[in-house]
Amino acid sequence: MSNTVTASQIAARQKFADSVLENDEATREQLLIAEDYYLEALEYRSNANPIDEIRVAYLHYSLGKLYARFDDRFLDGEVHFAAAIEGYKSMPDSCAIVANCYADLMVTKAKLILEESQDHKDDIAEIRPGSGAKAAGLSAMLSRGSRGKKVEVGAAEMALLRRLASTNEEAAECFRKADQFRLQAYNLQRKHAETLKEKVKKLEPTVAKSTSTALTVTAQPITRRSPAEIYAMLDKVAVGQQAAKRGLANAASQHINRALMTQAEREETDKANVLILGPTGCGKTLLVSSLAKSIGVPYYASDASKLTAAGYVGEDVQSLLEGLLRACNYDMNLAQNGIIYVDEIDKIAGHDMGGSKDVGGEAVQQELLTILEGTKIRVDGPSGKRGDEVEIDTTNILFIAGGAFVGLGDIVAQRVKSSKGTKIGFGATLEVKEEDKNHYQNQANAADFKRFGMIPEFIGRMPKRLFVEALTVEQLERILLEPKKALVAQKRLLLAATTDLRFTRGALRQIAEDAALTGTHGRALAEIMEAVLEPIIFEQPAIAIITAEMVKNRNAEIGGQNVAEERPAMPDFIVDDDTVEATMTVLIEAAYGRSGARRSTGRELVVRR
C-alpha cells in the first residue's frame, strides 16, 4: 500500500467496494477494482496497532463474497472465508453467516464442475458417435471404481474418461465440504441461541420492569448502506416526510461509516446526534425504529417524561444504556454501535420550581450531556444484582431525540416579527396561525430553544435537526392503504376468516378527514377504525362494506349498544318511586284493615331515602 494513501481515502475506497459488492449487476472490471480496494484496506487494518480483529474479519468476509462472483477465483474465496471464520470465532452468529456463505461457494463450485463433466461426456460422444449409452456406462463404472472389466477404449477417450472421473470426484468433495459448513453454521446458530436463552432467563426480572421499547437484533457483520438505500427502506413504511427521511438516511449512513472506522479514525470525527421536531402522531417514532431495522443495529426507545435526576424516583439517564444492552442481550460490540431514541424530549424543558430542584427538567438535561458526547459509563449488568456491572462506551452510540415542542413556533415568530420591526407591545402575545407554526419552528435557533427551556449545551450536542410536517388529509388517506403495515390491510387480514371487509373511497376519505381534525394525526386513524369496525367485528357478517355514513355515525352506533332493547320485568319487591305513597296505603290496609290504617304509627313500613 502506498504511504501517500490516507485513512480517509481507504475508508472512501472501501465504501465504494461495498457498493460494488452489493450490486448484482456489477461488471468484472468493477469487481476487480473492488478487489484492489478491499486488499488495500485489509493490509492497512492488518498493520494497525492494535489490530481490530472484527474489522479484519469483515474484510476477509467481503473478499470471500467477492471471489464467489468469479468462476475462476473460488480458491481465493475459500481462503478468505476461512480467515473470516477464524476472525469471528468469538461471535458465533457472525461465524454462522460466514459458514453459510462458504457453503454456498462450495455448492456453486460443485455445480460448475458438474457442468464441465457434462462437457466431457459430450466430447466422448463426439469421439465415438453413437456410443452415448456406452460412454454413460463407462462414466458410471469409473465413478464406482469398478475393476477387473476389460473394455476397448481409445487413448483420447480414456483421457476424457479420466478427466470425467476426476471432475465427478471433485464435485462430490465440494458437496461434502458444503454439507460440513452447513452443519457448522447450524451448530453455531444453535449454540448462539442457547447462549441468548440463558441470558434472557437472567434478564427476565429486569425486563419485566421496563416499560420502554427495544428492538432485539442478533450479531452480524456490519455492512455499509448508502443513504439512498436507507431512504428507500424508510419509504416503504412511512408516507410523506421526505426531508426527515433523507436526513435520517444520511445520519444512519454516517453512523455506519464511523462504526467501521478504526479507533484512531473515529477520534478524528464527531458523531452527529439528531433532534426531530414536529407534531405528535406524524411518524417520528416510526421513522426512527424503522431506521434501526434498516441498518440492523440494536434500538432502544424511552420517553423523556419518565426520566429523573439520579437518586430520585423514576428512571435515571443510565437506564437508557441498560435498555440498549438488554436489546442486544448484553452484546457490547453491538450495543456500542446502537441507536437510542428519547421521545417527548420537550417534556424535560427547564421550569421555575420556586427554589426547589427541577429533578425532571434541567437536571435531566445536564445528566444527558455526558452520554450524548461520548464517555465510558458503568451500568448494571445482566443479573441486575448489586456489584454486577459492565462498562459501556457511548462514543459511537447514535442518540436521536424527538418532541412536538408546542409553543416553540410562537417563540420563533415573536423573534422574527421583532427583528422585522413589527411592534408587538409590552407583555403582548403574538397570535400565530396553526398552519404557520411549523414554518416558524423550522427557523428555531439556540436562543429560541433556550427560551423554551432547553439548555444551550444540550442543543449543541444535537447538531442535526430535522422537522416532520403535520400530515395532510391526502397523506392520512395514503397511510390507510400504502405502507407495509397499512391499517386497512391489517383489518382485512384479521377478519378474513369470517368477513369480506371492503371500504368505499368516501369512507377512507372520511376517516382521514376526521383524523386530521383530532390533532393526533396518524394515531387517530387507528382509534377511528376501531370505532367504525366495532359492530362488524362483533356481528361477523359474510360481507361488510364500510361507507362514509358509517364513519360519521360511528359514535352513535357505539352509544346505541348501551341502550337496552327491552326493559326487563321487575320482581314484586321492587317499587316505583312515584307510587310509594299508594303502595304504603295498600300494604297497611291489607295488614290492618281500613280502620287500622288510621291508627298506624308509620313504623309498620320503613322506607329509606
Image (cartoon, rainbow, N blue to C red):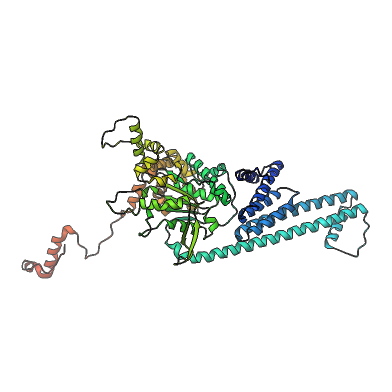
- State the image coordinates of residue 480 (x, y, percent, origin top left): 46, 44
**Image-based side of 441 in relation to 195, left or right:** left
- State the image coordinates of residue 520 (x, y, percent, origin top left): 38, 45
Q: Could you tell me which residue is drawn at 41 percent across and 54 percent down?
A: 538
Q: Could one spot residue 353 in this view of the protein? A: yes
Question: Looking at the picture, does residue 266 appear above or below residue 326?
Answer: above
- Residue toward you, 149 or 366: 366
Q: Could one spot residue 406 in this view of the protein? A: no
User: Picture quarter containing residue 411?
Assistant: top left
Question: Looking at the picture, does residue 29 appear above or below residue 202?
Answer: above
Q: Quadrant of the C terminus?
A: bottom left
Residue extending furthest front?
A: 3
- State the image coordinates of residue 102 (x, y, percent, origin top left): 69, 56
Question: Looking at the picture, does residue 48 appear above or below residue 424?
Answer: below
- Residue toward you, 191 or 582: 191
Q: Could you tell me which residue is drawn at 37 percent across and 56 percent down?
A: 309
